[in-house]
Image: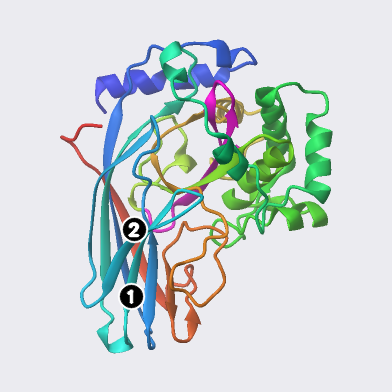
Amino acid sequence: MKRRRFLHLSTLLPFAATVSRSAFARQTTTVPHWRNFELTTQVEIAEPAGQTQLWLPVPLANAGDYQRRSDLRWSAPGAHVALAKIPGYDVELLHVQWADAESVRPVQLVATISTCDRRTTHDAASRVNSDISASTAQTYLQPTRYLPTDGIVAETAERITRNHDGDIEKARALYNWVVENTSRDAKTRGCGTGDVGSMLAFGNLGGKCADINGLFVALARAAKIPARDAYGIRVADSNLGYRCLGKSGDVSKAQHCRAEFYAKGRGWIAVDPADVRKVMLEEVAGGLPADDPKVVSARALLFGSWEMNWIAYNHGHDVALPGSTRAAVPFLMYPNGETRNGRLDSLDPATFKYSISSREVEGLTG
């Protein structure tokens, strides 16, 4: 590892272990360090039938100070291909269509993305353009199919935040509650469904990242704090000492959902309570208790920062896939496909073969 990179990252762990309520008042003089990745998605439909379609998530083109897309290219022989944007949640996707089964061929999508570790800062420069419009704030306060903001969700949010003032302190209370009351369930398929209403109604707060971080987002919205999921994929091993919080090479099953909330004058603030639970369950065989130093450090670090060995796709909920005859998908984090016989199972390699690989690229600028 380059010395500059090591020094930059080595400051994060002690920072994480000492994060307190005054952390948002600190300034940082760390020089941003950008890394560059090439993400390649390859898809083959095992059993095409009639008109056949694919929808592949595309990395965010520009996500503020932590992600930039510099190149996007694809190969889809015999297909009609369109790069489509869906209004509302920054969703961009590659839509691939074949008129008949005989025309279907393998597809490749290659994206080059630069990332920079994300930390909440409070110097004057970081506050420039940090505010969002009223319409954007309203977008990220709205309920969705799986993220209701009334009933038991509103009651739970009110109870958690009752004795806290200000969006940051309320969000911190919600974050701590989610970390302390949820659990990671290894049996959950994929990243879960994010069905927050059912989780609270049935008292089952187990799941994976789309469930746990979705719970934070729904509770924040119910507390009148704009919040959103960030759907993406891990692309490199962690440099912060966490074995379970990274993946490199074959990242076909490394999809991961994160979350963030908005505070006026501070902008979007990164959180990831789901990864705290992942550290507790998966970092070592047999799991770790909540008071283990690695868990304590992760819990502090993941309120206000993301290590960017991960790439964001979008913030989408209830995504209506263009040209599809089926219902909207809860989120777009996996390749999706459809034939005359219906929607393909994105998690079933027998009928929907895809692989996603990542490699770090030298010689580019962020």
Q: Is residue 184 above or below residue 93?
A: above
Range covered by the magenta-colored residues: 251-277
Q: Is residue 204 visible?
A: yes
Magenta stretch contains residue 278: no
Type of the residue with mark 1 = Gln
Tell whether 306 sits left or right of 300. Answer: left
Res. 92 image quadrant: bottom left
Q: Position of residue 188 (x, y in %)?
A: 61, 60
Res. 67 image quadrant: top left
- Tell which residue pokes out farthest to the front in this image: 134
Type of the residue with mark 2 = Ile
Tag of residue 97? 1
Disc 2, disc 1: CB below 8 Å? no
Magenta stretch contains residue 265: yes
Q: Position of residue 362 (x, y in %)?
A: 18, 36
Q: CA distance from mark 2 to mark 1?
A: 20 Å
Number of numbered discs on residues: 2
Q: Residues within 10 Å of mark 1 (few under 14, many from 20)?
A: many
> Along the line of sight, which residue is nearer the eye, 246 or 137?
137
Which residue in the protein does label 2 denote? 356
Q: Position of residue 257 (x, y in %)?
A: 52, 47
Q: Residues within 10 Å of mark 2 (few under 14, many from 20)?
A: many
